[in-house]
Image (cartoon, rainbow, N blue to C red):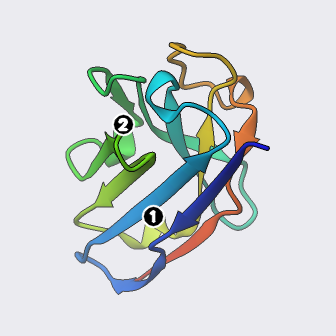
Amino acid sequence: QVQLVESGGGLVQAGGSLRLSCALSGRTFRNYGMGWFRQAPGKEREFVAAISFSGSNTNYTDSVKGRFTISRDNAKNTVYLQMNSLKPEDTAVYYCAVLPRPYMFYVDLQRYDVWGQGTQVTVSS
């Protein structure tokens, strides 16, 4: 059974930082592209960042470029999202997700087949 478990959300003041973690089990982590998405209240889920299986390719939505960094540790089967200079508009439930086949790299939400349970990030002004 493929499973993603996220951690690291919380409440932070504007300008602060958080690091989200997401551990994958049930697939050979080092072969799979991973992504982070978020969903704010009343809004659709949106792409935040993606990383290729090797970590050599990354992609970010424009609103987080220069503030967020996606990375992975293939020895720990874990993908991270380092979030700096947080803004109130970053408040959302953050989800990690994995692509369904090895060596894929996509940013489209519909391409991902397994999702974590989500972790709440709240940024106060």
Q: Check the image and report above or below for 42 versus 34.
A: below
Residue at x-position 50% and y-position 13% = 103
Question: x, y percentage for residue 83?
Answer: 31, 61
Tell me where residue 52 sits by quadrant: top left
Q: Which residue is mark 1?
A: 90
Q: Residue furthest right?
A: 1
Q: Residue furthest top?
A: 103
Residue at x-position 42% and y-position 36% = 61
User: Could you tell which of marks 2 and 1 lies nearer the N-terminus?
Assistant: 2
Horizontal placement of 119 versus 3: left or right?
left
Horizontal placement of 23 versus 76: left or right?
right
Residue type pointed to by label 2: Asp
Q: Residues within 10 Å of mark 1 (few under 14, many from 20)?
A: many
Question: x, y percentage for residue 91?
Answer: 51, 70
The residue nearer to you, when weighing 53 against 107, is: 53
Task: For marks 2 and 1, give the CA distance.
Answer: 13 Å
Question: x, y percentage for residue 7?
Answer: 51, 70
Q: Which mark, by number, is residue 114?
A: none
Residue type pointed to by label 1: Asp
Q: Which residue is mark 2?
A: 62
In the rendered image, is residue 125 in sight? no
Q: Check the image and report above or below for 87 versus 62.
A: below
Q: Quadrant of the N terminus?
A: top right
Residue at x-position 73% and y-position 42% = 2
